[in-house]
Amino acid sequence: MTARTIMIGRDIERSLDRIGMEIVERNHGVANLSIVGIHTGGVYLAQRIKQQIEEREEVTLPAGTLDITLYRDDWSLISQNPIVKKSDIGFLLEDKRVILVDDVIFTGRTIRAAMDAIMDYGRPLSIQLAVLVDRGGRELPIQPDYVGMTVTPAANERVDVLLAEKDTRDAVVITKR
């Protein structure tokens, strides 16, 4: 299996710094802002973006984690016994601008499931999407608001985001299936 690295640690950090600044700029500050990461990679990226914004803006932002396993339209095709992680949104979503964070966007189905899950917690003012990698190939009309990198891999390739929190390093690699 051949793999090629398209981002390394400093590229990822630079992209997350830019995304954090764009979030603050587009929202005219941090009032009513909250960050929710989608398990698993999105949780780690959301924590990094949150920390970067908090340090720069000298604030504390509400943040949460979201598992979308049972909201997926294909969960029964993936496994008869899906592994469900914990969702943790310990704040009210009403009147919040939710920044939903994931590592890679592909078909848009994960994000659709995440929006359904968020609505079960309340009705936010808005939902904005931040992703580290946009690989194209949408099946649903869902587009990210903030993107670290856009790539167009071949149909037989997959994009993997490796993060130090769960892997040995930070990198984005493209591998043949």
Image (cartoon, helix red, strand yellow):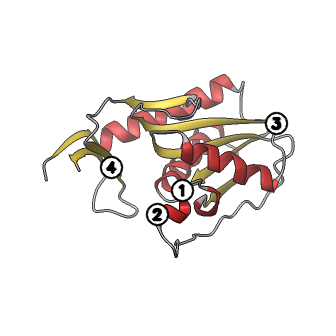
Type of amino acid at the residue the image marks with label 2: Ile
10 Å crowding of disc 4: few (<14), some (14-19), many (20+): some
Which residue is drawn at the image coordinates 13% and 53% (left, top)? 1
Type of amino acid at the residue the image marks with label 4: Asp
Residue beneath disc 2? 78
Task: Depth check: give the residue in front, 101 or 155.
Answer: 155
Q: Earlier in the sequence, mark 1 or mark 4?
A: 1
CB contact under 8 Å: marks 2 and 1 = yes
Type of amino acid at the residue the image marks with label 3: Leu
Q: Image quadrant of residue 106?
A: top left
- 40, above or below 130, in the image: below
113 lies left or right of 82:
right
Q: CA distance from mark 1 to mark 4?
A: 20 Å
Q: Earlier in the sequence, mark 2 or mark 4?
A: 2
> In the image, which disc is placed on residue 104?
none
67 lies left or right of 168:
right
Residue beneath disc 4? 160
Residue beneath disc 3? 125
Which residue is drawn at the image coordinates 61% and 58% (left, top)? 68
- 87, above or below 142, in the image: below
147 lies left or right of 29:
left
- For discs 1 and 4, the disc positioned in front in the rendered view: 1
Residue 108: percent from the left, percent from the top?
54, 39
